[in-house]
Image (tube, rainbow, N blue to C red):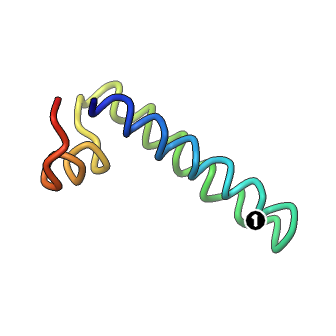
């Protein structure tokens, strides 16, 4: 269940940042880059802030 929530939230963040970059300001793409860097970092360290937040909110693994 955690994996499903994680993928939905990250996908929404990416789509939101792209929409904001198109309609508001191109600098919103930095948020998209941050998400990508965070995903790469979590692959190496096995730690992700979003996962920690979801677990504290009671989402089951």
Q: Is residue 18 left or right of residue 7?
A: right
| Element on which disc 1 rests | helix
Splitting the image into 4 quarters, where does residue 53 fall?
A: bottom left
| Residue 17 picture quarter | bottom right
Residue 20, image x and y in percent?
75, 65
Left or right placement of residue 31 versus residue 53 in this view: right
The C terminus appears in which quarter of the rendering?
A: top left
Q: Residue at x 78, y 58 (%)?
A: 19
**Residue located 28% across and 42% down the image:** 48
x then y, percent, for residue 12: 58, 48
On-image quarter of the N terminus = top left
Please, is residue 58 above or below residue 2 in the view?
Answer: below
Residue at the image position 33 percent from the left and 34 percent from the top: 42
Q: Is residue 22 above or below residue 24?
A: above
Task: State whether residue 48 is above or below residue 44.
Answer: below
From the image, tell me which residue sits under label 1: 20
Local crowd size for mark 1, using a 10 Å CA cut-off: few (<14), some (14–19), many (≥20): some
Where residue 31 sits: x, y (%)? 60, 58
**Residue found farthest to the right:** 23
Residue nearest the viewer, comparing 27 with 12:
12
Viewed as shown, does residue 8 lie left or right of 19? Answer: left
Q: Position of residue 23 (x, y in %)?
A: 86, 68
The number of numbered discs placed on residues in the rendered structure image is 1
Give the residue drawn at x 23%, y 37%: 47
């Amino acid at each position: 269940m955690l994996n499903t929530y994680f993928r939905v939230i990250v996908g929404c963040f990416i789509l939101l940042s792209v929409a904001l970059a198109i309609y508001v300001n191109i600098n919103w793409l930095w948020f998209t880059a941050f998400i990508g860097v965070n995903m790469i970092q979590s692959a190496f360290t096995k730690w992700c802030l979003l996962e920690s937040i979801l677990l504290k909110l009671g989402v089951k693994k």
